[in-house]
Image (cartoon, rainbow, N blue to C red):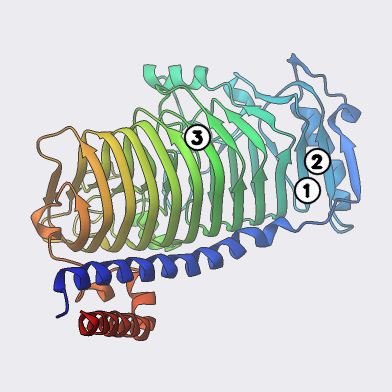
Amino acid sequence: MINSENLSFQLVDVLLVLAFCGHIAWTVKASSQCKQALSREIRPHSVAITEFGAVGDGVTLNTKAFQNAIFYLNSFSDKGGAKLFVPAGRWLTGSFDLISHLTLWLDKDAVILGSDNPDDWPVVDPLPSYGRGVELPGGRHRSLIYGRNLTDVIITGDNGTIDGQGSVWWNWFKRKTLDYTRPHLVELMNSTGVVISNLTFLNSPFWTIHPVYCRHVIVQNVTILAPLDSPNTDGINPDSSNDVCIEDCYISTGDDLIAIKSGWDEYGISFARPSTNIIIRRLIGHNRKGSGIAIGSEMSGGVSEVYAENLYFFDSSTAITIKTARGRGGYVRNIYILNVTLVGVDTAIRFDSTFSPHPDDFYDPNALPVIERITIKDVIGNNIKVAGLLKGIEGDTFHHVCLLNIALTVTSGSPWNCSYIQGYSAMVSPETCEPLKESIYPNHSSDCYHLSNHLRSSVGILILAISKHNSSLITNDAWH
């Protein structure tokens, strides 16, 4: 006689194997995308910043030297491009522009220092998808390293350092004495073929690395550090950008380690430039405020096709967050996050629909975000205060949220708090909230992003496995 208990365990094993095989297939696809932009020819022309009068004493202002060097190198942009070499030293500078077909290379002991004089960071127009500065109406200070409408830009080196010296900006922010929104450390705008790698970024005045309206971006092997109490020092913020790969990074800052954005309320809706095809892999980090990976809260242009795997967050406020609000509009859909390890995290998963700051009074309060097809799987965590705070919007339920194979050691007596959420789960501990208790298997895998992609194609394998298992059991019973 067939043992039904053994059969049920075998079915679970087969399902898990199929799920694992399915995500491997997508991982291979993601890996090839991430590595495409790494094949770069060596630049045929190279100069050192010292050839333009720069002094690496940490005191002399070298803005003109950087500007003159890059102006000179622009003559080689149609001749294979050029490299600007920054040797060991402490190179104080204000904001400067990059050019196309340029490699900015920092030697091992090279440190580019941001000036603490706000006049060395010019004020530029707000981004059209935001309508104003993020912090204040009007313009915003330009980033220390800036570029727009560029192609083939590489910022790299032998683990050199770019230090924004942001403490003066943080103090001005806390005292409310700023006239304009603080600058980012690196911002590239409307650019294609961007690689940022093998560097350390310190003490950004505001967000650290901000590719906005960009395509084909790689951020790889970087360390980003800022004090845990520094305000809004996000690590990497892809914004209305597509085909972005972030991998092998360590980030410890005062806010989100990575935040995917796409514009703010009516300005983001009108600009209509989504962030899509974002890959995040092998990320380690922590913070006291913010999240390991956040989507939003400025997501009005839409965010989709996000794949994140092999994440490790420790001693942090939140691991995974979707932030939105009434008036945002836009969408967040087709998100797949897997292989996450958490230690000492306050909240493992959070959907927050109360991020209410708006750019002005002209936003549409009836513009509701669409949040759907979010899959989070293979998560383990120790010393977690709360497993999940998942709160949609009344009249705007977040749909098809799927949790699979999650095991958390939770200290709270109420591990889950859910409202206006609909979805499914399987193998989640502690047991998830009521709106997610319906099992993914066997009827709802097609409702869960990515889980259905391989299950449909693997039905034959599953049937074959079950058939072989049944035959084996029948044969064994016959012998007994």
Task: Give the alpha-carbon distance from disc 3 to disc 1, as whole Å.
Answer: 26 Å
- Front one among 168 and 249: 249
The numbered mark, 2 or 1, whose residue comes first in the sequence reads 2
Q: At x 54% / y 25%, what residue is drawn?
A: 203
Q: Is residue 137 visible?
A: no
Task: Give the alpha-carbon distance from disc 3 to disc 2, as whole Å.
Answer: 30 Å
**Amino acid type of the residue that numbered disc 1 sits on in the rendered structure:** Leu
The numbered mark, 3 or 2, whose residue comes first in the sequence reads 2
Say whether marks 3 and 1 touch (CB < 8 Å): no
In the drawing, what numbered circle is on residue 321? none
In the drawing, what numbered circle is on residue 102? 1
Residue 1 in the image: state x and y as whole percent: 14, 80
Q: At x 85% / y 52%, what residue is drawn?
A: 42
In the drawing, what numbered circle is on residue 251? 3
Residue 125 in the image: state x and y as whole percent: 52, 43
- Give the foreground label among 3 and 1: 3
Q: At x 20% / y 69%, what residue is drawn?
A: 6
Above or below, 314 against 475 in this view is above
Say whether marks 2 and 1 touch (CB < 8 Å): yes
Above or below, 148 against 284 in this view is below
SS assignment at label 1:
strand
Q: Which residue is mark 2?
A: 70
Residue 254 in the image: state x and y as whole percent: 41, 28
Picture quarter containing residue 8? bottom left
**Amino acid type of the residue that numbered disc 2 sits on in the rendered structure:** Ile
